[in-house]
């Protein structure tokens, strides 16, 4: 059996490689490997974090939806969540600027949809991270939404990554308008 481990997933979930592998093997019913490999797994911790329901024997362990959701998520609902969260239009000095179509299935959203599909590639944890960082960006830019990028550009440029290391305190004192020129 070949198991690919996404290190970003481990970092985001705070799972160790052994814990992830153990959960994955239970999920794929690879119980024999669990007996053969010398994995350091705190099953009780994983149960407290709702990743697994423990049985009396390893074969009776059941992986919970919390772990399954790290991999399997409906792409259409992920993209719809992105489109509904990302501002559709912004007010500028010259009027209103549209950033994307309201309907996620609209033809004008096709390029953004295809780029996002390649980006998340069925990895719900990637989508969750992007949505978390979009929320941070919206908090930081709440007084400067006129400068938001078109949705497709935002996806192409991976703009959410710029907000990775900001915390809630960084977003609280940003009530000043953005100054783009000085005279």
Image (tube, rainbow, N blue to C red):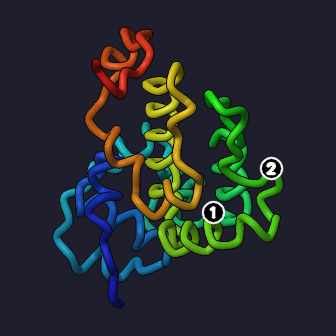
Pick out the residue farthest to the front: 183
Residue denoted by label 1: 73
Vertical placement of residue 156 versus 142, above or below: below
List x then y, in percent, for residue 32: 35, 82
Q: Nearer the viewer, mark 1 or mark 2?
A: 2
- Mark 1, Cα crowd under 10 Å, few <14 / some 14-19 / many 20+, is some
Q: Residue at x 46, y 64 (%)?
A: 156
List x then y, in percent, for residue 124: 53, 59
List x then y, in percent, for residue 123: 50, 65
Q: Which mark is residue 166?
A: none
The one of 157 and 180 positioned closer to us in this rendering: 180
- Mark 2, Cα crowd under 10 Å, few <14 / some 14-19 / many 20+, is some
Q: Quadrant of residue 106?
A: bottom right
Q: CA distance from mark 1 to mark 2?
A: 22 Å
Quadrant holding the N terminus: bottom left
Q: Which mark is residue 102?
A: 2
Quadrant holding the C terminus: top left
Q: Earlier in the sequence, mark 1 or mark 2?
A: 1
> In the rendered picture of this protein, how many numbered marks are placed on residues?
2
Q: Residue at x 29, y 46 (%)?
A: 14
Position of 40 with respect to 136 (left or right) is left
């Amino acid at each position: 059996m070949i198991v690919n481990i996404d290190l970003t997933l481990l970092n985001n979930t705070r799972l160790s490689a052994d814990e992830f592998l153990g959960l994955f093997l239970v999920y794929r019913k690879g119980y024999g490997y669990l007996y053969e490999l010398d994995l350091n797994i705190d099953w009780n911790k994983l149960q407290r974090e709702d990743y697994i329901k423990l049985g009396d024997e390893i074969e009776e362990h059941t992986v919970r939806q919390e772990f399954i959701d790290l991999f399997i998520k409906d792409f259409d609902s992920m993209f719809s969540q992105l489109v509904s969260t990302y501002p559709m239009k912004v007010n500028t000095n010259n009027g209103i600027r549209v950033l994307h179509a309201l309907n996620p299935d609209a033809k004008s959203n096709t390029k953004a949809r295809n780029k996002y599909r390649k980006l998340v590639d069925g990895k719900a944890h990637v989508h969750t991270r992007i949505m978390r960082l979009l929320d941070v960006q919206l908090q930081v830019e709440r007084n400067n939404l006129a400068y938001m990028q078109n949705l497709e550009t935002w996806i192409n440029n991976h703009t959410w990554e710029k907000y990775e290391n900001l915390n809630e305190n960084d977003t609280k004192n940003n009530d000043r308008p953005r100054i783009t020129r000085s005279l």
